[in-house]
Amino acid sequence: MKKAGEPLAVAGDKPVGGFRQKAFNLVGWIAFGLLVPPILAMAGYPQAQGFISEGLGTWGSPIALVAYFYALLFLRVFFGSDQRYTPVLLGYALSFIYFSCALDIGFLHWLYRLAHQVPFLSFNVLNLGAGIATVFLANALSGWKKAGVVADITLLVVLPAAALVAAGIFLPPLFGLQP
């Protein structure tokens, strides 16, 4: 047991974080695997998504996979090694908006239609990529103890939105993407 005034972890000590944190961090990485079938379907390879949808019915739809993704990520947040919850919750909310622009989620169909009326937001793959990048940034910021609200907003709101707009303007002609 450490005495008062001694640092909690010094060189040579076992790393901070136990089995539970490592296990739930692994659960968070497994959650990203749930996004592979919708990504492949958007890229023109619908076989994986079709296999899951056939086997699980509506429980295997892209929208259900996104719901499972968030459920596993919330398990990771609350039982994993996150230290700050503000960037995680902000990032997950924003990524859900990006996912809603990429996948036609029932109660957010109006947002999907609205986004597809704007030329640089009408590419599902780019919207999904912005959502995934936002989740990665949110998870990274959760471990950055000295970051404040300004850093959270800049890195989670401004940076992915600017990247999405730039990608929507410049990448489609380069790769021949169609909305």
Image (cartoon, grey):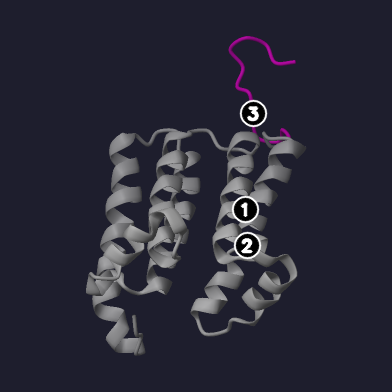
Q: Secondary structure at mark 1?
A: helix
Q: Residue at x 60, y 65 (%)?
A: 61
**Residue type (three-letter) at the residue carrying disc 3:** Ala
Task: Give the numbered dot on residue 169.
Answer: none
Near mark 3 (Cα within 10 A), the count class, few <14, some 14-19 or many ≥20, is few
In the depicted view, which residue is nearer to us: 65 or 169? 65
Q: Mark 2 sits on what residue?
A: 34
Viewed as shown, does residue 28 lie left or right of 124? right
Q: Is residue 125 above or below residue 147?
A: below
Q: Is residue 38 above or below residue 110?
A: below
Residue that sits furthest to the top in the current view? 4
Query: Which is more N-terminal, label 2 or label 1?
Result: 2
Q: Are marks 1 and 3 in contact (CB under 8 Å)?
A: no
Determine crowd level at label 2: few under 14, some 14-19, many 20+ residues with C-alpha closer than 10 A: many
Tell me the crowding category of disc 1: few under 14, some 14 to 19, or many 20 or more residues within 10 angstroms, Cα based. some
Quadrant holding the N terminus: top right
Q: Amino acid at mark 1?
A: Tyr
Mark 1–mark 2 Cα distance, whole angstroms, equals 7 Å
In front: label 1 or label 3: 1
Say which residue appears at 62% left-offset and 9% top-offset: 4
The answer to which quarter of the image holds residue 144 is top left
Give left or right: position of 25 versus 132: right
SS for callout 2: loop
State the CA–CA distance, disc 2 to disc 3. Answer: 35 Å
- Residue 68, which numbered label? 1
Q: Position of residue 44 (x, y in %)?
A: 52, 85
Contact flag, marks 1 and 2 (Cβ < 8 Å): yes
Q: Which residue was labeled with disc 3?
A: 9
